[in-house]
Amino acid sequence: MTAKKQQSVKPLSVWETAAYSLGSLGREFSNNCVNAFFLIYLCIYQGLNPMIMTVAFVLAKIWDAVNDPMLATIVNNVKKSRFGRYRPWIFVGAILNAMTLVAMFVPLGASVSVVGRYAYYILIYVLWGMSFTLMDVPFWSMLPAIANSTEERNKASSMAKLIGGLGGFLVGMVGTSLILPNFSKQGMSKAYMILGATAGVIMIVFVLITVIFNKEKYPIPHANVGLKTILYLFRVNDQLRAYALSLVLYLTGTNLALSQILYLFIYCYEDGANLLDSHYSYTLYWVVACTGQGIAMFFYNQLTRIIPRQKIYEFSFWGCIISYVLMFGIFFFLKPGNYLLNAVLIAVSGAFLMLASGMNQIGSTVMIADITDYSEYKTGRRADSVMFSVSTLITKAAAAVAMLILGIGISVAGLPTVSELPITAPDGTYTQSVNVFMEDNKYRINNEETWELVSSQEQYRGKAEFVQENLIAENSLTILRVFMFLMPIPLCIIAYIVYKKKYRLYGKTYDDIKAEIDRRRLESGLTAEGDASETVRSET
């Protein structure tokens, strides 16, 4: 296209950036609802074995390794509609993902066998992952189609990650401070189902804003791709390989730490060591931690004007390592009576972790867009959806590995499950539910108020036992803490080394590559009104 026609395309507006970012909030409502609550719901409130479930989740991620590129290839190859190439897929994926999200937290009746429970929840988890891919890959693949320059992409991706981080915080706050405490008297299983339904509805509403108010303005060179092409792109794109290895190591460490935070708040606080009830302490942690993440994402663009982008990305590795060391010490030395100091130290270490994590999220999103440009420069093929599916696959794979490590930790620690006991009045009417630890088919209780409620129920008297000592052994808590902190630190160090030695798409190197891509597009006659035919290089 001519320079005049190229300049006629309006740059990304504030409203378009906001609309795109709100879709990220919806995505993260679904993603964080599953990451934060699903495993603990299955293992504690549904009584399923954590090792079996975590192994099943890892196997599901192996399936994701197969279906993510398949789904991305379908998105990439289907003919562009009048609504664009990506927006229809985002909408369909959001609807399907919301349906599976609700189904994940549906409690199964006593008539369903144990095998049936495992089969149901594993299948739903697989379907949730596939539907999330169907929404997520087109969402990020659309970024080069709405933002052409690196500055525009930085602005859109940083705002999307900022608002997405807010979604992660909000689902934690809505779950632990509003829905679970207020609906727990009707039964925790019902409370979790309401949480899943709420997250699904919120997700659809915000994703619709992206679909309605973002137009794909920049045509992207397009060629149909298959599995052979995917393998070819991965083989010849050295920057894609470096990015993938570094990010999967980093995200495994951060996911492991963040996934276990809720367990630490439930199990590792001694009486008098926490400022508030565990539900509200967890919310306070996320309020402060996500404030740190929000600061990082809000000022990311301004920081890149002062500090080179690669230096900010390097800080994200060391920032997480420092936070892990701080939390490791804090959770080993919490003391009753120091509840205010404990709360401040935990929140500050969490804020530092999320500050670094926020910078990494934005940096890695812009990097995959740059790597896609590099692919076009080096091979003549972009395959945006396939390239962005790598990022989605890495995120899922890292979460699965972290979940496996966490599941091993929970099993080795021998943590008791939580049973939900309905309490009825003398006339037989339901009044409330209480949660008690269950071990060796006994309800073990060390709280006098809870004991009075449970012991008043004839059906529990033979199984309830009042104990004076702590219900969880100190060795179990030590194992839980060790699994959380000693694994992420070396993972982040190795991830940093890989990035530092192998990745080079920044500064003059990237500027020269982008200039060459723009020159080729002008020569090929690619216009802002539609795709032009593209001559691609041979794969062999």
Image (tube, rainbow, N blue to C red):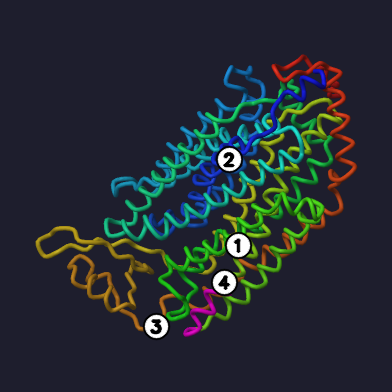
Residue at the disc numbered 1: 257
| 3D distance between C-alphas at marks 2 and 1 | 30 Å
Mark found first going from the N terminus, 2 or 1 = 2
Q: Amino acid at mark 3?
A: Glu
Q: For the C terminus, which image quadrant?
A: top right
- Please state which of residues 455 and 170 is positioned toward the viewer in this rendering: 170
Sooner in the amino-acid sequence: mark 4 or mark 2 = 2
Residue identifier under label 4 = 346
Q: Magenta region: which residues?
A: 336-345
Residue 326 numbered tag: none
Q: Earlier in the sequence, mark 3 or mark 1?
A: 1
- Label 3 crowd bin: few (<14), some (14–19), many (20+), radius 10 Å: few
The residue carrying pointer 2 sits among few (fewer than 14), some (14 to 19) or many (20 or more) residues within 10 Å by Cα, namely some
Asked whether the residues under the numbered discs 3 and 1 touch, taking CB atoms below 8 Å apart as contact, a structural biologist would say no
Q: Quick check: marks 1 and 4 in contact, CB under 8 Å?
A: no
Compared to 408, does 205 lie above or below? above
Residue at 34 percent across and 78 percent down: it is: 446
- For marks 3 and 2 on the same chain, the one whose residue lies earlier in the sequence: 2
- Would you say the magenta stretch is mainly helix, strand or loop? helix
- Which residue was labeled with disc 3? 469
Instruction: Give the spatial CA distance, label 1 vs label 4.
Output: 13 Å
The residue lying at 42 percent from left, 36 percent from top is 99
Residue that numbered label 2 is attached to: 18
